[in-house]
Image: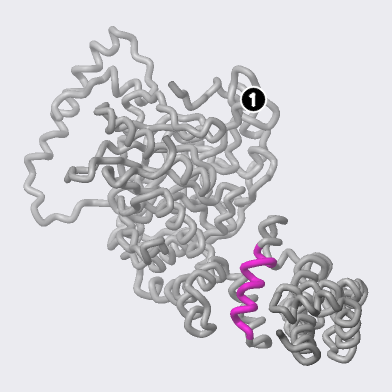
Amino acid sequence: MKGDASPEFLTTIGLEVHAQLSTRTKIFCGCEVRFGSPPNTLVCPVCLGLPGVLPVLNREVFLLGLRAVLAFGGAPSKLIKFDRKNYYYPDLPKGYQISQYDAPLGRGGFVEIETSGGPKRIRLNRIHLEEDAGKLIHDAAADSSLVDLNRAGVPLIEMVSEPDLESPDDAHAYLSTLKSVLKTIGVSLCDMEKGHLRCDANVSVRRAGDAVLGKKVEVKNMNSFKAVKAALQYEIGRQTEALGKGEGLYQETRLWDEAKGMTFLMRSKEEAHDYRYFPEPDLVPFFVTQEQIEAERRRIPELPRQKAARFASAYGLSAYDANLLTQDEEPAEFFETCAKIYPDYKGLANWMTGPVSAYLNEKAVSLSQTRLCPETLVGLLQLVKEGSLSLQAAREKVFPEVVGDGRDPKEVMEKKGLLQVSDEAALDEWVAEAIRSNSKVVNDFKSGKETAAMFLVGQVMRKSGGKANPGKVQELVRKRLLETAGPA
Amino acid sequence: MSHIDLRYTSHLARLGFKPEELKVFGPQVDKILHFVEQLNKVDVEGVEPTSHPLPLANVFREDKIAPSIEMEEFLQHCPSRHGSFFKVPKIIEEKS
């Protein structure tokens, strides 16, 4: 029961995304934010929730959040205040989370995503600030859970979308776009492995004719974009099947089980959502100034979508390539540097989205962590273009050393004896010999068997030890055959 | 709202009241509620809601690292620990 809903049914998805803000310190105290530190070493009376302490908002949290609101085209609220969200859980030392309820940092705005049916706007309901909770470790001891509060008080923005997403693919595109914008504007590093970006989904399925949305099911515990997509696919299948059988659906919270590939009902007591929000008396209200808005606007660089549009028009790239190249800043910048010294933009884009991107994915590194620089990549491309190096040898034999060890492509080529023979005089000798010693094949060609020429090309390639430029050889074999024999 | 279900509310606040205490406190809490409810009669048309009792706004701290505290200082007061961790009864997200 995997897969998208059939057209008989309509799917509605909304996502709540938490992104960790790129600050040095926590949201309400001066404890450092540093992933992987020994447990309970980055805590103080404020983030431990000890009595008598006073949280004070980190200015950078406020400004980064404001930048995100502006980048997505939202409006900062006139009055911004914090509220307490009350619930008991051992990762929450105060017994409440400082969050924002009715006066969030900003409202509105949208995320424009690329779908198979063209671009689509996903509206944002709100963006608010809140503190993260600590971390629970369940497996270390049999009958107990362990608590590390280093993460308690780490600053987050929560971005709540309107239910404008209609498929798991939409959800995936939305998350990728969100991530690439947040990284570009310097609001979050969006390092998935460090949990910088977390997502819960609300999903409902209804019959095509129904005016009201179906029962909203909240899905939690998805740890990657892939998991979000898989969980949504499963959940849509489950709901569609239930509707098809005439079974009822319930508003409930379900947990994604990655190993089983299924969602399970979370057994939660009824009061789980009775958070009894009330204003946080320890924090005063905040008002955004025009100066702050202008300053943060200036810190928003060209956004990925704008960049993609510019790449498509300035370099004549397909929308697909332009999008791929502009998802992250680093490859985009790399491409532009190369483009200044290598005018075959399409060829360059093919290398960036092909071998370069494959290498980065395989090694799970970013460009700056490799030894590749624009000059060496362009050097490699030029060797291929001038015919000194075959494309295959460039990809398989030279590129790995250039990207991995920072070698000069020409040196690698020469050291490995990969220089292609493109020189016509040298090739001609081999071609003449092949024609002389294969008279039967030449006759075949004469009698109209075009493929016979390819046999001769193969002979020349073998003779050259694979070093002959195959394109040139083909050209030459055909030319000589036509000259000496002429087709029948 | 004219009545507070004290059994439910005290559970949310993790307050362990005995049945005889619930019997005493229940009506008392309702009385407090009724007293405060008088405010509902006040005409607040056109009055800005108070967001904070103090006439202060925009109080920030700079994003500068301040020292954290020594682990022993707080873990020694903790009823149960495991190395550098707080130890609590097993918590799992239950699945049915």
User: Which quarter of the figure has residue A291?
Assistant: bottom left
User: Is residue A387 toward the left or the right of residue A326 in the image?
Assistant: right
Place of residue A52 in the rendered image (x, y in percent of width and height, measured from the top left) = 47, 39
Please check the rendered image and state whether residue A346 is part of the magenta-colored stretch, yes or no.
Answer: yes
The quadrant in which the C terminus of chain A is found is bottom right
Q: Is residue A338 above or below residue A140?
A: below
Q: Which residue ends up furthest to the top in the rendered image?
A: B20
Nearer to me, A28 or A154: A154
Please check the rendered image and state whether residue A146 is part of the magenta-colored stretch, yes or no.
Answer: no
Place of residue A465 in the rendered image (x, y in percent of width and height, measured from the top left) = 90, 72
Secondary element type, mark 1: strand
Q: Residues within 10 Å of mark 1 (few under 14, many from 20)?
A: some
Q: Is residue B75 above or below residue A109?
A: above
Please give the name of the residue rendered at 33% of the width and 63% of the height, measured from the top-left corner: A121
The span picked out in magenta is A344-357
Place of residue B59 in the rendered image (x, y in percent of width and height, measured from the top left) = 42, 59
Residue designated by label 1? B81
Please give the name of the residue rendered at 32% of the width and 59% of the height, measured from the top-left corner: A123
Can residue A330 be seen here? The reply is: yes
Can residue A382 be seen here? The reply is: no
The quadrant in which the N terminus of chain A is found is top left
The image's colour scheme reads one colour
Nearer to me, A359 or B80: A359
Please give the name of the residue rendered at 36% of the width and 58% of the height, measured from the top-left corner: A105
Chain of the residue under label 1: B
The amino acid at mark 1 is Arg
